[in-house]
Every structure is written in structure tokens, then in C-alpha cells.
Image: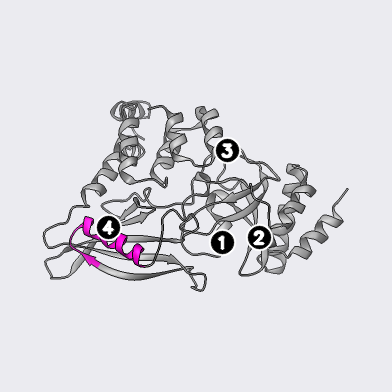
């Protein structure tokens, strides 16, 4: 399977897919592992992709070469082995296949199900409801289907902000149940999981994670739509700068906070375009795309800023610094539309 085929499958954003394929020589193994493990696709498909990718690596040879190239008195062979193993396709394949195998119930074990839904009135942005206990994973999925039908919910509604948590519990010697693993069932697929025992299973790479550091094609003045559904609502942003493309904080955007009624800046790759919500989300990079629809309401000012910036990185950097300094000096967390328009008026050459 070619890397270009994998990228096209993982990224709904045509801009990201095309750019990553054109610049695939800049992608290292850890980039590819991250983009597969954090992708909004079924974990069974992630396992298939990782299995295919593992055919291209020889982790034992890499470990031997790494140890051989280090001074004997400084070679921490155990650390080298652990680091290279955890950053291999094979290790991540084994990690996800373990999670898949745990979908089978243990004797006396149960699966619990809860809907998790977006609630703008909640302090953390999310709430839970519809608790249910099932004896098997398939019964848990049946409950989800019935629950969605009773509430007329549809996965095809791209603006639907809900998903289901399925937790596996096994009985302990003391009579209590212990949580083994948690799955996140999104869009009719088990997309993510995390183990309860983080010491035995230290990786968290298979959870929705906004911190996906990849190179991007976006430039100062681009108006983009960020789509992290069903974890967060869609949002329009404007790129102020992309100074160092391979840096996690380099892609700086401007967005409107509908709760505080101000415009704020943040690192797009870190999911900072949703600063007001507690929960992490699918990385914006999988679906981020240039905005096609005409802007309305509080987003219309993004077009005014775009015209002012004229795709000039220096202007974008200067505007970003103005907002940053203003927030620091006055202990605030954003700027108003009137302040932005005053800034544009006073900085037009």
C-alpha cells in the first residue's frame, strides 16, 4: 500500500492530502504513526494499515544499529529498545490488535454504554446520558442503534455533536468490577480507545488528539473551516501566520469566541481554536479546508482582515503580536470587532 493511498484515505481535507503527498519525503515514521493512530477511522482499519506499514521496517536491525553507533559507556540499551519499539509500526499494530481482542467479554464481565453529547450550557461543554449495561460488545452496539433510533439521531448529520463511550468491566477478587478499556464509538465505528491501566499500556496514541504536528499548506490570510465534529462544532478561522511550518505552534489562527464575544488567537495544530471547551477533539488537520460558503454574522470580519493582510506574513505577524501584547498587558483574552477595525484603520499604509 502506497503512502499516498494512506494519506488520501485518512485526510478528508483535499488541501492537506495533496500537500502531504507532494511533501512525503519530509514525513518521518513518527509522523505517519501519529496520523494513522489518531485518524477518525475504525480501529480495525488502523490495524490493517499498521500491519501493512510494518512490512517496510526492520526494528531489530534499527535497534542493533542504534546501539552499535553509541559509546559503550553511554548506551542505555533498554531505553533504546523501548523507544524504538514504541515508535514502530509493529508495536502500534500489536497495541491496537490487543484492544480489538478485548471486545470479547470475559467470564462475568460487562460492557457499559453512555451517550456523550455536546452541551453549550455545561462548564466543560459536554454531558452524559442513557447509561446502559450489556453482556457483550455486540449487545452494546445494538443498544446504541436502538437509542439513536428512539431519539431520531443520524450519523450522517455532520453537525451532530454526540458519540458513545463503551467501557469494558471485569470482576475482581474483591467482588468489585474493574474498568479495563474504554472505546469511543463515533459515526458507526470504534474510532478510539484507551486502557485504564496506563502503566501496563502507556500509549495514548489511539485517542482523539488535537496535537498532530504535521506540515501544512496554509498561509497568512487563508480563511479556513475547522471541522472537529462530533467533538466540537465547526468553526471558521483566519490564518495570521505560519512562520515555521514544522513547528507545532507555528500555524496561528484567529477565531471568534461565541461565549465571550471576542476574537482570539491560538495554535491551530494544538486545537486552540476551541479554547473555551474542555474536551480534546479530533485533530483539525484531518478535515481543515478553505472555506467555501460565504461568511455570515460574527465571521464576516475575517474577510475584512483578509483584505487588510494582503497575504503578507509580516502584517499577519504584526497583528498577532498586537493581540498577544494587548492580552498580556491588560489581562484579557481577546479583542472586539471594533478594536480590530480600529487597528486596520490605523495600520493601513
In the image, residue 237 lies at what x, y percent?
A: 64, 53
| Residue 246 in the image: above or below residue 337 | above
**Mark 3 vs mark 4: which is more N-terminal?**
3
Tell me the number on the disc at residue 264: 2
Q: SS class of the residue under badge 2? A: strand
Label 2 vs 1, first from the N-terminus = 2
- Cβ atoms under marks 2 and 1 closer than 8 Å: yes
Q: Position of residue 161 (x, y in %)?
A: 46, 61
| Numbered label attached to residue 3 | none
User: Reading the chain from its start, which is encountered first: label 2 or label 3?
Assistant: 3
Q: Would you name the residue on which mark 4 appears? A: 141
Q: Nearer the viewer, mark 1 or mark 3?
A: 3
Give the number of the mark in front: 1 or 4. Answer: 4
Q: Is residue 231 left or right of residue 91?
A: right
Magenta stretch: includes residue 62 = no
Q: Residue furthest right?
A: 349
Marks 2 and 4, how far apart in space?
40 Å
Which one is earlier in the sequence, the residue at label 2 or at label 4?
4
> In front of the other: label 2 or label 3?
3
Q: Is residue 143 magenta?
A: yes
Residue carrying label 3: 15
Read off the residue under disc 1: 275
**Rendered image quadrant of residue 144:** bottom left
Amino acid at each position: 500500500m502506497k503512502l499516498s493511498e494512506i494519506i488520501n484515505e485518512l485526510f478528508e481535507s483535499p488541501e492537506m492530502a495533496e500537500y502531504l503527498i507532494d511533501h512525503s519525503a519530509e514525513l518521518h515514521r513518527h509522523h505517519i504513526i501519529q496520523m494513522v493512530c489518531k485518524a477518525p477511522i475504525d480501529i480495525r482499519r488502523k490495524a490493517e494499515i499498521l500491519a501493512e506499514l510494518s512490512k517496510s521496517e526492520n526494528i531489530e536491525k534499527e535497534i542493533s544499529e542504534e546501539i552499535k553507533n553509541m559509546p559503550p559507556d553511554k548506551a542505555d540499551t533498554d531505553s533504546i529498545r523501548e523507544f524504538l519499539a514504541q515508535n514502530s509500526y509493529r508495536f502500534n499494530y500489536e497495541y491496537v490488535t490487543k484492544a480489538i481482542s478485548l471486545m470479547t467479554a470475559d467470564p462475568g464481565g460487562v460492557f457499559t454504554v453512555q451517550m456523550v453529547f455536546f452541551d453549550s450550557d455545561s462548564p466543560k461543554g459536554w454531558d452524559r446520558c442513557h447509561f446502559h449495561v450489556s453482556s457483550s460488545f455486540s449487545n452494546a452496539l445494538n443498544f446504541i442503534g436502538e437509542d439513536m433510533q428512539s431519539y431520531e439521531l443520524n450519523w450522517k448529520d455532520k453537525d451532530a455533536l454526540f458519540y458513545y463511550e463503551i467501557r469494558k468491566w471485569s470482576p475482581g477478587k474483591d467482588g468489585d468490577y474493574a474498568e479495563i478499556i474504554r472505546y469511543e464509538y463515533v459515526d458507526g465505528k470504534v474510532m478510539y480507545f484507551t486502557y485504564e491501566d496506563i502503566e501496563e499500556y502507556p500509549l495514548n496514541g489511539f485517542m482523539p488528539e488535537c496535537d498532530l504536528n504535521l506540515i501544512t499548506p496554509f498561509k497568512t490570510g487563508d480563511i479556513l473551516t475547522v471541522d472537529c465534529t462530533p467533538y466540537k462544532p465547526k468553526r471558521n478561522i483566519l490564518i495570521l501566520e505560519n512562520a515555521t511550518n514544522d513547528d507545532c505552534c507555528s500555524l496561528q489562527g484567529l477565531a471568534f469566541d461565541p461565549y465571550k464575544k471576542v476574537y482570539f488567537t491560538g495554535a491551530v495544530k494544538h486545537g486552540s481554536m476551541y479554547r473555551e471547551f474542555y474536551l480534546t477533539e479530533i485533530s483539525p488537520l484531518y478535515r481543515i479546508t478553505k472555506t467555501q460558503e460565504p461568511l455570515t454574522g460574527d465571521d464576516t470580519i475575517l474577510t475584512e482582515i483578509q483584505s487588510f493582510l494582503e497575504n503578507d506574513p509580516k502584517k499577519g505577524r504584526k497583528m498577532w503580536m498586537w493581540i498577544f501584547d494587548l492580552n498580556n498587558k491588560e489581562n484579557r483574552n481577546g479583542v472586539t470587532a471594533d478594536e480590530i477595525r480600529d487597528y486596520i484603520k490605523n495600520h493601513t499604509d
